[in-house]
Image (spheres, rainbow, N blue to C red):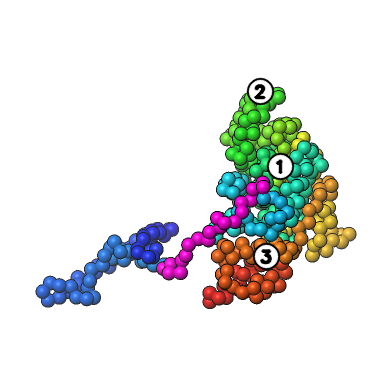
Amino acid sequence: MRPIIRFSLTPLSRGISTSAPVLAVAKPKKAAAASKGGKQGFNQKKKDSASGGSGGSGQATIALKFSMSGQPPDLSDLKRLQLSNYKSDNVGKPTTFTKTSFDKFKSFGLSKKVERELSSNGGPASVIRQLTIDLSKQLDGDKGKSSKDARYVLTGDRGSGKSMLLLQSVAYALESGWMVLFNPKATEWTNSSSHYIYDSSTQTFNQWQASQQILSTLLSNNKDKLDSIKLTADISLPQGKTAAKGSKLSELVSVGSKDDRVATQALDAVMGVLEQQTQYPVLWAIDEAQTLFTTSKYRTPDYTPIEPYHLSAPRLALDFISGRRSFAKGTVLTSLSLSDPTNLPSPSLIQGLTLSSTQPLTPYTQLDPYHLSHASSNLKKIEVPYKMSDVEISGMYELLVKKGLTSENQSDGLFMELKSSSGDNPYELKRGLNRLRASLAV
């Protein structure tokens, strides 16, 4: 049975007491011999049950002292990552995300690693890079274009900052009035973590839970825009449901997000409306996109592996990534993630995007023709360099100092040592600093 954990507070400490269910009758305790005059001796002093002691109740108390605790870092003097600060003069400057943007990030469902990094040590912050500015300008230039001509993929070595650049671009689009659909964990579409069922009419496997999640986040972050878009024709859904001509698009999104029986078809219909409307530019941002180009963890009843293009959610994404479907006004921005060694780019993706890789590709390497076709569909690569520029890496170190990860009284020698050992890579810089702190704590 699971132990019961109770928390109790004592002055200047946090007490944790645990107790397990009593499975046997406890031995009777011997009565303490009363001292002369009826007074208790030193060893027989009564225990105060309110202080968290066991008092014969089968509980044990562990007190954790916080003698070295301090105030959380104060980042209030840093610039906000707002529209006015997306300019070249601010390259290398540490900035904080607005509360509105961060709340929306969390509602989209950040990965645990990214959310933990943004939530700790003073709150969500990042460093403006030259690519941050370049991507914001690219979004401005693509605002009136079809997404068929604005399909991008962020590539680069592990730890180069692709996911953070994607977040900064999403924040810019949110601030600029775009309709934003952001999926930070595309791996959840392929890792066999949700229900699926075969649909003979489309010859694909419906993922109604994934469809509901996409619709729910679309509605919660864009409700005002979805309210203003009206349906131009009746839309029929399963179970005899219909979205009438002239009704709000938000109503169709709401129906799909709440009813799993119609979620997949409703999502397809909603994306069809977004393809045609021209009131708002649409940004579809997808992280961990490499998972869409390799065999999924899903299996058929006879245990045959299912490819992502046979699953409803990845297939829909691949339609827009490859340009088979497109928004009249919008952009599709994806990023490859190398943080999970079990979910690396497939040979088909490496070949289609001509990525550098340690995996040897030979004439005998098996390539999936569909994955290869999707990867070589004129996706525009945006290479994120392994190294930050000198001004960017200095800004990163300044942010780490602000977050309290190192003392501001440290000499320039520490910065130069970390800069040299990390190769100016942001991920390696943080790893080096964490290793240094761990060695000092021993």
Distance from Cα at disc 2 to Cα at disc 1:
24 Å
Residue at x 70%, y 53% (from the top left corner): 165
Image quadrant assignment for residue 5: bottom left
Whether residue 170 is visible to the viewer of this picture, yes or no, is no
> Which residue bears the numbered disc 2?
246
Residue at x 68%, y 73% (from the top left corner): 416
> Which residue bears the numbered disc 3?
394
Residue 283 is tagged as 1
**From what the image shows, is residue 45 above or below residue 214?**
below
**Could you say where residue 145 lies in the image, as x and y percent from the top left?**
79, 38
In-image side of 377 versus 220 (left or right): right
- The amino acid marked with disc number 1 is Leu
Magenta span dominant secondary structure: loop
Nearer to us of marks 2 and 3 is: 3
**Could you say where residue 427 lies in the image, as x and y percent from the top left?**
67, 64
Callouts 1 and 3 close, C-beta under 8 Å: no
In-image side of 429 versus 380 (left or right): left
In-image side of 52 versus 119 (left or right): left
Distance from Cα at disc 2 to Cα at disc 3:
54 Å
Reply yes or no: does residue 273 show up in magenta.
Answer: no
- The amino acid marked with disc number 2 is Gly
In-image side of 100 versus 61 (left or right): right
